Amino acid sequence: MPERIQVLRTEIAAAAASAGRSVSDITLLAVSKAQPAEAVRTACAAGLTDFGESYLNEALGKLAALEDLPLTWHFIGRLQANKTRPIAERFQWVHGVDRLHIAERLAQQRPVHAPALNICLQVNLAGESSKGGVSPAELPALAAAVAALSRLRLRGLMCIPPPQSDPAGQRAWFAQLRQLRDGLNAAGAALDTLSMGMSADFPNAIREGSTIVRIGTALFGARPPSA
Ligand SMILES: *Cc1c(COP(=O)(O)O)cnc(C)c1O
């Protein structure tokens, strides 16, 4: 896996250079869902600091097993209102917030002594019913309401666009998310994060301004089929 990390870092640097961007503005978020704690340990030893999990029960076991490591944990899965508390207590980032009720619960449940919980709003760009995310039309109102909650820090937007093999098609989705972010900032928001790009499309996400690429299979290999 250290070799894969090296390859990924080279690809991230090449994509950043092709867009005239600095690699220091791009975080490689290692998506460790369905991977054992030992794989996270190895990735950490190879220099990675940020890890993403999608399934709460699995994640909590892993977080407990890795408490000795100075890691930043991101929850990137679907959020259920009755399961927000452990996320508010144990994670530093949540990427899939798409409704105010969930954000309010996270805000109420974030421990007062902890730093503010970093939030990305998930946007459903293609209106896919199989995926979560707020619609672009409803985004401004949700962003304003979430930004007003204490204990949370609204950082930016996240998307999972429909799979697309052609590079221009990939870029078009990512450009849409960037434009939504720019529109909110022009209206007074201060969003510094675009969480976009996965194993199959991260170079084009970087060309469109991604600041966090969420990468699983290109880093850890294929996930076990049960996951
Ligand atoms: C699983 C997952 C990823 C990583 O996907 P890969 O294709 O394995 O890189 C990224 N983001 C989210 C939200 C995921 O659920």
Image (cartoon, rainbow, N blue to C red):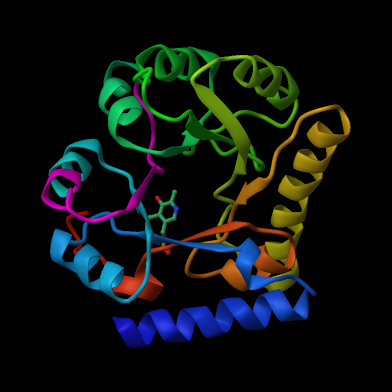
Q: Position of residue 67 (x, y in %)?
A: 18, 48
Identify the residue at image location x=36%, y=72%. Answer: 47
In magenta segment, residue 168 = no
In magenta segment, residue 66 = yes
Residue that protrudes farthest toward the right in the picture: 186
Identify the residue at image location x=41%, y=14%. Answer: 105
Identify the residue at image location x=57%, y=15%. Answer: 149
Helix, strand or loop for the magenta stretch, by majority:
loop
Identify the residue at image location x=74%, y=23%. Answer: 140
Ligand number 1: quarter of image: bottom left
Res. 114 in view: yes
**In this rendering, position of residue 185 left or right of residue 81:** right
Q: Position of residue 180 (x, y in %)?
A: 77, 39
**From which residue to which does the magenta span run?**
63-80
Quadrant showing the C terminus = bottom left
Q: Name above or below for residue 201 compared with residue 53.
A: below
Of 25 and 179, nearer the camera is 25
Quadrant showing the N terminus = bottom left
**In this rendering, position of residue 73 left or right of residue 67:** right
Q: Quadrant of residue 185?
A: top right
Q: Position of residue 171 (x, y in %)?
A: 73, 63
Of 89 and 218, nearer the camera is 89
Q: Name above or below for residue 161 compared with residue 24.
A: above
**In this rendering, position of residue 209 left or right of residue 45:** right
Q: How many numbered discs sit on the rendered protein?
A: 0
Res. 123 in view: no
Q: Position of residue 209 (x, y in %)?
A: 72, 59
Q: Quadrant of residue 51?
A: bottom left
Of 48 and 209, nearer the camera is 48
